[in-house]
Image (tube, grey):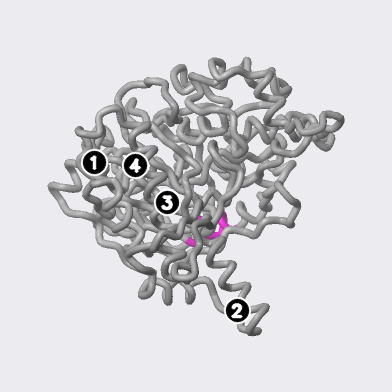
Amino acid sequence: MKYITVDLGSTFIKSAILDIEGLTITRHPSFPMPQRLEDTGRRFEVSAEQIYSITKQIIDRSIEQYGEEIGGILFSTQMHGFVLADNRGKPLTPYVSWQDERCLEEVPGRAGVSYLQHLETLISRDEMEETGVYLKAPLALCNLYTMIQQGLPPTDSGKTHFCTLGSYLIFRLTGQNVSHLTNAAPTGLANVVQVEWEQSLIRKIGCEAFEFPKLRDSLDIAGFYSYQGLDIPVYPDVGDQQAAILGTLAKPGTDVSINIGTAAQISMIQQDFRSGHYEIRPFFDGQYLYTISRMPGGRNLDVLIQFIQGIGASVFGVQVDKNEIWTSLQGIIGDSSKGLRVNTSFFKTMEADAGAISQITNENFEIATLFAAAYEDIAATYDKYISVICEDRGALERIVFSGGVSGKNPKLLEVIKRTTGLEGALPPLQDEVFLGLFRLALVCAGVCGTLAETDTFLKNKSMPVVREQ
C-alpha cells in the first residue's frame, strides 16, 4: 500500500510516495511555494488558488502513476495561517501566512496603538491558557480580528468558512472542512484541552457567524478524493512541526528538539498540560509539545546574506545567488567572534523589536567573525529558552536537530552543542518530515495501533530507504 504525502512549507511544497510494504520513501521534485502576492508592508498573503492548483497536480499525477495502490493522502503544513472560503471551498481571501503581521498596524484614531495591543485589552492571558498559545502577531486570531475591523469584503456566496491551510486543501478535495488539532491550535482559536473551538474567543473577535472546521485529534479519515474512478481516503492535516519531530524519533522528557527552518522552534514532548512561559502545542497519543516559537532561524541569517548580496550588486555589479554565498561561507566562518556581537532579533520577538551589530573594533569586523557572532547569539538564545521549557536540565540527554537550516550548517550546530553542553543528533533521514509522515501512514494503514508502536516497528524492521523520482 502506498500513501501520497504533501508537505507545504514556507519555501517549498514537497511531496513523496510512502510505500508501507516496501519500506521506501520516493521523493518527488519540489515546487516553490507561490510568491507573496505583493509587498504590502506587514501583510504576507499568498494565492490560495495557486497553492491548491500545485497540490492537486501533485496528487493527480501520483494517482495516475499508482492507481489502486494508493491507500490515502496525508498532509503536513505550515501553521498559524488561514484562508476564508465559501460553501464550495473556493477561497474568498488569499492564504494569510504566519509571516503576516497586519495586527501590528495602527488602529485608526488611536495613535501608537496597534490592533494587537487593543486585542490584549480585550483578551486576557488566562482566557488564552487552554489554547496553549498567547496573543502574538502570527496568530490567525490576531490577523483575522484585524481584517474584520478593517472591513472584510462582502460575499454573496452564503456561509464563510474559516480554514487552516490544510483544512482548506481537504475542503477543496473532499467537500469536508476538517482540521487536525495540531493545525487548529496554532490559530489561537482552539481549546487544546477540550479539543473544541473556543467560542468565547471566536465571539470576541467577531467571527461567530463563520463556519469552523470539524476538529480531529485522531487520524480518522476526513473525506474522500474522487479521481479517475477511485475514491482515495484523505486524512486530517497535521502541523509540519509535529510531523518533523515525529521524524526525528525524539524521546519524551529527555530530548530537546530544535527545528531550524525559516524560523526556529525549541520543543520537548511532555505528558502533561502544564502552563508556563511557553506554548503548549498538541502532539499525538495524548502528548503535548512545550514550545518556544519565533526563535532566530534561517530568515535571520538571510538578513546578513542579503546584505552581502546587496554589496555585490550595488558596488560591484555582480548578482550572486544566496546558495552560492552559503556554500562559500561554510569554509570561512570562524570559531570565534573576537568580541564582535550580533543581536539576531531582526524580526520582532517577545524581547526585542530589532537586532544590532555592536562591539565593533578595527580588528574584528569581517565576514568570518560576523557570522561567528551571529551563531553565538543564536546558540545563546536557544540555551536560554531550553531552560524555560525544561525545569530539570539534568534530565536532558541530547538535542535532536531538524529543519533545512540544520542540515546545511554544521558549524552552527557545533556552536549550539558547545553553548548548551548537550550532545546533538540529526534525524535518521534527511527529510525528517517524510519519516514522520511515514509513521503516521503506518497507523493509518493499521500496521501499528499507535505512534509509539511505529518507533518499535522501525527499529525492528529498518528505516525506509529514500529514493528520488
Mark with earlier residue (3, 2): 2
Cα separation between marks 3 and 1: 33 Å
The 10 Å Cα crowd at callout 4, few under 14, some 14 to 19, many 20 or more, is many
What secondary structure is found at the residue carrying circle 4?
Answer: helix
Mark with earlier residue (2, 4): 2
The 10 Å Cα crowd at callout 1, few under 14, some 14 to 19, many 20 or more, is many
Q: Which residue is mark 1?
A: 454
Q: Which residue is mark 2?
A: 312
- In percent of width and height, residue 360 lies at 50, 62
Mark with earlier residue (3, 1): 3
Cα separation between marks 2 and 4: 46 Å
Marks 3,2: beta carbons within 8 A: no
From the viewer's side, name the closer residue of 90 and 372.
Answer: 372
Magenta residues, start to end: 54-61
Mark with earlier residue (3, 4): 3
Cα separation between marks 2 and 1: 50 Å
Q: Amino acid at mark 2?
A: Gly
The residue under the point 38% across, 39% down is 384
Q: Is residue 182 visible?
A: yes
The residue under the point 60% across, 39% down is 138
The 10 Å Cα crowd at callout 2, few under 14, some 14 to 19, many 20 or more, is some
Is the stretch drawn in magenta largely helix, strand or loop?
helix
Q: Is residue 330 above or below residue 354?
A: below
Q: Is residue 156 visible?
A: no
From the viewer's side, name the closer residue of 357 and 405.
Answer: 357
Q: Is residue 171 left or right of residue 263?
A: right
